[in-house]
Each structure stands twice: as structure tokens, then as C-alpha cells.
Image (cartoon, helix red, strand yellow):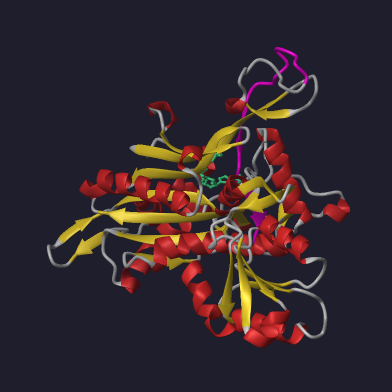
Amino acid sequence: MSDPELMEQVVNLCKRRGFIFPSAEIYGGFRSTYDYGPLGVLMLRNVKEAWWRAMVQLRDDVVGLDAAILSPPAIWEASGHLENFTDPLVDCRNCKERFRLDQLTDPTTCPNCGKTGTFTEARQFNLMFKTHAGPVESEGTVAYLRPETAQGIFTNFMNVLSTSRKKPPFGIAQIGKAFRNEITPGNFVFRTREFEQMELEYFVPPDEGPKWYEYWCAERFRWYTDLGIPEEQLRLRPHEADELSHYSSGTSDVEFRYPWGWGELEGIANRADYDLTQHAKHSGEKLEYFDQATGERYVPHVIEPSAGATRSMMAFLLAAYTEDEVNGETRTVLRLHHRLAPYQVAVLPLSKKDTLSPMAREVLHLLQPHFMTEYDDTQSIGRRYRRQDEIGTPYCITVDFDSLDDKAVTVRDRDTLAQDRVPVDHLVDHLREKLQ
Ligand code: ATP
């Protein structure tokens, strides 16, 4: 399948099967915003859960946080976003299209109408969404929707340090919405104005920065391969010196091969002591670590792996989409890792007859506390298998007429198509072994 075809198939599948819908569609849509439907909400939660599991649950050196989205200008003044979080915007005087100057292959020619020399002077456009907190709109009531989750972590550094009994090296993890008034959103949910991030700020003794930077680059790359993205569709790209932010002594992007080329999935940056020092200076508070054992006081350095939840969900979908042939028929399969699939199990009674329904429903209720389970008794069994393959369900459980006598069901594997007969009594253990 060609790259444009793959993109089209995945976007269609997302709409058709209820993963992702264009927002406000009944009003003609709202540019580049999307809503996550019944399957999308399950999968997005699974992406975030897989990140939380790897970054928080399985570690004893990382704690979580959920900071506010609305934030005062002081935070963004200190972080440098008010001044620097800008993109260069140009307008084409001929066709009136807008572009980010730094994304144009030829900065003198309009890619829309093809005219040369029609661009306006570049203007620096701040990407933060500005609003007002309270009923009166005045300078004093200005608030911003956070453009990244990271700053809420830095402003809570002392709160977390004093309540969590952690000491460097330790991290604070956060998942949540972020907002950027992107000049050119697009490529489906790759670049949207409202999106979700998964960020870790990992605080380390100053001389350990480079070591932990290397560590997190390797860890984060592995997270994507562990969850099923083939290594050849991923790369770790260190930033060139002229790409680095002024505070960064090293940044690498985990990139994915999207249908239109390599693009960022996640950035891992060595931010040194920039953020804590800036917030200390602007707030007048001391933001440092005091080691009681050694009497040493220092501002920790920070390594930041910053990933997009919505953007990586799209990469997982693109990497999982396949078409193969079964019994001479084309079948669409989402070969999603079982942790990411919207449903882990589907219960399918062989026929809709009343004789099978009670037992099939019993099996459903048996599985529901353990796995996200779907129940489907419409259409032929073959078509129902195809529907589950298409949404990535790893196991289908068929209840047939023999089940009434032998108290066993058939477990069908999405990828190998192998069918195992499993006693209902052992079903939860059997699936748990495969899925956990
Ligand atoms: P880009 O260069 O693509 O604009 P960035 O370098 O500005 O990205 P970061 O500030 O490093 O992005 O944000 C961390 C992560 O958040 C990105 O790797 C990406 O996964 C996600 N992200 C950033 N902007 C968007 C967006 N507009 N839509 C969806 N995800 C985004």
C-alpha cells in the first residue's frame, strides 16, 4: 500500500469505526480539532496508561502530578514563553494563504499558488491561547491555556520535594491537555491546536545530567518498540547545534516515519538548571535541593522526555494497520499491542438464538471485571471476526452449541488465527496469561 493510501485508510477507519471524529461536524466542523469516539477514547486512555505504567507505576523514583491548565502570565514570563514561544508567520499577498516561514522548502515561493515574491515580511506570532479569568476583561485578568504541561511541574517542585520524600535523581510525571495556536495545523491529529502531552521532568545532581540524558533517550525509544512500533519506522535524531533551544545542552527527537516523511513523536532534552533558576528568579522563592546528609545545596538539572499522547496514538494506528488475505478475502487488521487495543476481548455467541445468549452473557460478565470486553451478536460469525480484526481486538471468544455441554469456549487469536478450546473455568487465567 502506498503512503497516501495508508493515511487515507487509517483516517477512514478512525471515522467509520468511531476512533476519531472531526469536531463540531454538524456545524460544518471546526478546523483541525477532533473528538475521540467510543473506540478512540479507549485507545487514547490505553496509550496514556501504558506511559504511566512505564514512567510511574514500575519505578520508585517518579511521582505524578496533575496541575491546572489555566495559568497566570507570571509563569510564562519566567519560562520565556511570552517572549520566545513564537513561530514566524508569512501571508501570501496573492492567494491570502498563511504559512510558517521555517516550514517552507522555498521561502520565496508560495506552495499554494506558486507565485514568487508575494510573501509579507515575517511576523513573530505567539502560539499561546490567551483568555481572561473572571467577568471583567482587563490587563490584570489575563490568563493563558498552558502550551505544555511542564511548567506546572517546575512551579510545584518544592511542594513535591517536601511531600514525596524523594531526592535527586527523581522525576515528576504529568499527562494532560496542552494548547497551541498553531499556524498550520494538519496531517490529521499530528498537529492540532488542542492535544495531550505526557511529560516527565527528571531532576538530577548537576554533574549527572549527560548520563541521565543518554539513559532517557534509550528508555523512551524502547517504550515505542515495546509497544509494537517496528524499529525501522523509528529513529532517534539528535538536534543540530543551530536547532537547540538556548537553554538546552542536548536534545534528541524520537521520530516516526509518517506517510509524509520523518516527524517528531517525542523530544528528549537536557534543560540543565534553566527552568528552576528562571522560576526562582521571577518568584523570589528558593527552588533547590538541600542534602541533609552532606550539607550540600544545589539547583538540580533537568532531563525532559516530552511526548504527545494524541500524536503517538496516531503513530500506533499507522504502524498497526495491515491488510492480509484469509481464505481468498482481504482482511483489515490493526495489529495493535494488546495494551493499546480498545477492547482486549470480544464475546461472540455463534448464533443469536436464545439458547446461546444466557451463557454468552455469563461469559461476558465473567470477563468484564478483568478486561475491556465487547459483546457482539449481530451478523455472521465471519463478519464479526472481521469487525474485531479491524479494531485490533486481540482475542475473540466464541460461544457455540457445544459450549452448553462441555462448558468450554473457542478463543481465536487475531494475529495467528489459531483457535483454542478453553474451559470457561480457566478462561480468565488463560486470557490473563496472554494479555498481562
Ligand atoms: P513540533 O516541532 O512538531 O511543533 P515541538 O518540538 O514544538 O513539536 P514539543 O514542544 O517538544 O514539540 O512538544 C512535545 C511533544 O508534544 C511533541 O513531540 C509532540 O508529540 C507533542 N505536540 C507538540 N505540539 C503538538 C501539536 N500541535 N499537536 C499534537 N501534538 C503536539
Count of labels in the image: 0
Q: Does residue 427 show up magenta in the picture?
A: no
The answer to whether residue 194 is visible is yes
Residue 401, by quadrant, is: bottom right
Residue at 53% x, 43% y: name it.
82
Q: Is residue 310 above or below residue 424?
A: above
Question: Which of the pair 236/74 is nearer the observer?
Answer: 236
Q: Where does ligand 1 appear, by image quarter?
A: top right
Q: Which segment is the magenta one? A: 113-133
Residue 140 screen position, x and y as percent? 60, 56
The answer to whether residue 22 is visible is no
Question: Which of the pair 368/377 is nearer the observer?
Answer: 377
436 lies left or right of 137: left
Residue at 25% x, 46% y: name it.
211
Residue at 37% x, 66% y: name it.
58
Residue 61 screen position, x and y as percent? 31, 64
Looking at the image, which residue sits at the far top?
116
Residue 146 screen position, x and y as percent? 56, 54
207 lies left or right of 422: left
